[in-house]
């Protein structure tokens, strides 16, 4: 999620693998780019959303420099981008964040942990306490603009037959840690905005984000090591269950990144923006993608199987997240279109196909979260370190 979408990663997956520590080039002081243009710091710059946001910003002539913060530094060097290592889940991160934020024109906060679902205290430490550190550091460094990656998962249960706008309640689905944490951070940001009215605050609420390079990461986060690349072939999925509530919105990650770029570079952008592509994803679309038949069935058999697999550490995604997906509302994106001038280039179907193609090809990127496989054993390392247990 966010859109689904880690300390040092982003809102659509957790970090994995290992990488160099320290700084890649000159860190601190808002990225310290020479020359003019906006100075932007991206927190959680190496995951699904982060890599697309960094690329979009680095290619914008209005942006002079980008400083990417991550737990582990990547072997990826987009233009005008520098790197620094920070783990926002650690108490000591507050001072480092403040130092890196000084002189920045905008901070984009994407860092989020999806795993470990079996240890919610750990995700809370990064996702909630880490977000509070980012907000506090942005205020201490007097950053003019803060762009935060919220999610459709922050919304309370809502309708599937009509879209809701940004005024829909953001109380999440309380049984799912992801939604609970996204909702809590929304409340914390409410307080932050009241206490710092001089700061321009933007909240992005994307649907599920997909791109080919994130397919291996998302397979690790949600399906686990038992889903092989061969199983992504359409002929191996004969039926798609049509479950009550199975209707959600998807978006290509690069389209979401364009909205973040617009939010950073548009001084009038503020408040919340829903992000999603048409049409909504349902069983009929999934069946079309895989050449499968649609079979209507109740949710409980699927939910029971997922719950058993999760308890046995065969599947990393929790059954509570499945419950939330069936209850998420459809979102109205008119505000982003009208105020930001944003329009997705890819349909939801194309975004899903990008994921399927990337999964089949084992795609990835030269960052720890998006690596095509874990170092030191690939899928065996996933099993050895505990399915649903590792951050």
Image: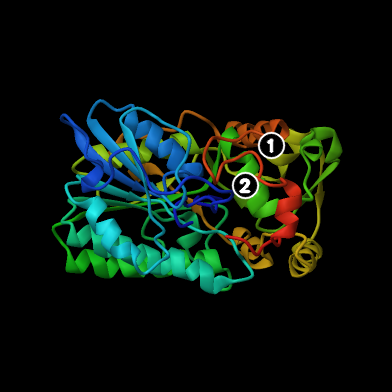
**Is 42 situated left or right of 29 in this image?**
right
Label tally: 2
Q: Quadrant of residue 262?
A: top left
Provide the secondary structure element on which disc 2 rests: helix
Examine the rendering and report whether any part of residue 170 can be seen.
no
User: Where is residue 116 drawn, in percent x and y?
Assistant: 60, 64
Q: Are marks 2 and 1 in contact (CB under 8 Å)?
A: yes
Left or right of 118, for residue 142? left
Query: CA separation, marks 2 and 1?
Result: 9 Å
Q: Nearest the camera: 272 or 380?
A: 380
Front-most of 367 and 268?
Answer: 367
At 23% across and 45% down in the image, what residue appears? Answer: 30
Identify the element where label 1 is drawn.
Answer: helix
**Sequence-first disc among 2 and 1:** 2
Q: Position of residue 224 (x, y in %)?
A: 72, 53
Q: In front: 342, or 48?
A: 48
Q: Taking 126 as reference, is 120 left or right?
A: right
Q: Which quarter of the image is occupied by the C terminus?
A: bottom right
Compared with 382, 321 (above or below) is below
Which residue lies under the disc numbered 1? Answer: 359
Q: Position of residue 78 (x, y in %)?
A: 39, 29
Question: Which residue is depicted at the point 78% across and 42% down?
Answer: 228
Q: Is residue 174 above or below residue 244?
A: below
Q: Which residue is mark 2?
A: 218
């Amino acid at each position: 999620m966010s859109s689904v979408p880690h300390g040092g990663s982003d809102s659509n997956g957790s970090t994995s693998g290992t990488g160099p520590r320290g700084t890649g080039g000159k860190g601190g002081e808002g990225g310290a780019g020479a020359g003019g243009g906006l100075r932007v710091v991206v927190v959680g710059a190496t995951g699904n959303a982060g890599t697309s946001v960094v690329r979009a910003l680095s290619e914008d002539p209005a942006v002079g420099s980008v400083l990417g913060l991550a737990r582990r530094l990547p072997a990826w060097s987009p233009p005008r981008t520098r790197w620094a290592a920070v783990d926002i889940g650690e108490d000591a991160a507050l001072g480092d964040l403040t130092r890196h934020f000084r002189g920045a024109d905008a901070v984009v906060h994407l860092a989020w942990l999806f795993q470990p679902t079996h240890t919610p205290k750990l995700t809370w430490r990064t996702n909630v306490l880490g977000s509070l550190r980012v907000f506090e550091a942005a205020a201490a460094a007097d950053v003019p603009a803060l762009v935060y990656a919220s999610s459709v998962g922050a919304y309370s249960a809502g309708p599937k037959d009509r879209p809701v706008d940004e005024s829909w309640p953001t109380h999440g689905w309380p049984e799912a840690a992801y939604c609970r944490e996204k909702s809590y951070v929304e409340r914390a940001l409410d307080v932050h905005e009241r206490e710092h009215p001089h700061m321009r605050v933007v909240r992005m609420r994307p649907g599920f984000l997909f791109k080919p390079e994130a397919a291996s990461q998302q397979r690790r986060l949600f399906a686990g090591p038992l889903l092989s690349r061969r199983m992504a072939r359409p002929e191996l999925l004969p039926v798609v269950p049509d479950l009550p509530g199975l209707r959600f919105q998807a978006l290509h990650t690069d389209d979401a990144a364009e909205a973040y770029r617009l939010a950073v570079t548009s001084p009038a952008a503020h408040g919340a923006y829903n992000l999603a592509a048409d049409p909504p994803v349902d069983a009929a679309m999934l069946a079309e993608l895989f050449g499968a038949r649609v079979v209507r069935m109740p949710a409980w058999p699927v939910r029971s199987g997922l719950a058993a697999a999760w308890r046995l550490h065969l599947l990393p995604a929790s059954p509570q997240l499945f419950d939330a997906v069936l209850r998420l509302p459809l979102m109205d994106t008119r505000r982003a279109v009208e105020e930001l001038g944003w329009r997705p280039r890819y349909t939801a179907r194309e975004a899903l196909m990008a994921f399927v193609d990337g999964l089949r090809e084992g795609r990835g990127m030269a960052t720890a979260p998006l690596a095509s496989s874990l170092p030191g054993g690939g899928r065996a390392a996933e099993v050895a370190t505990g399915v649903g247990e590792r951050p």
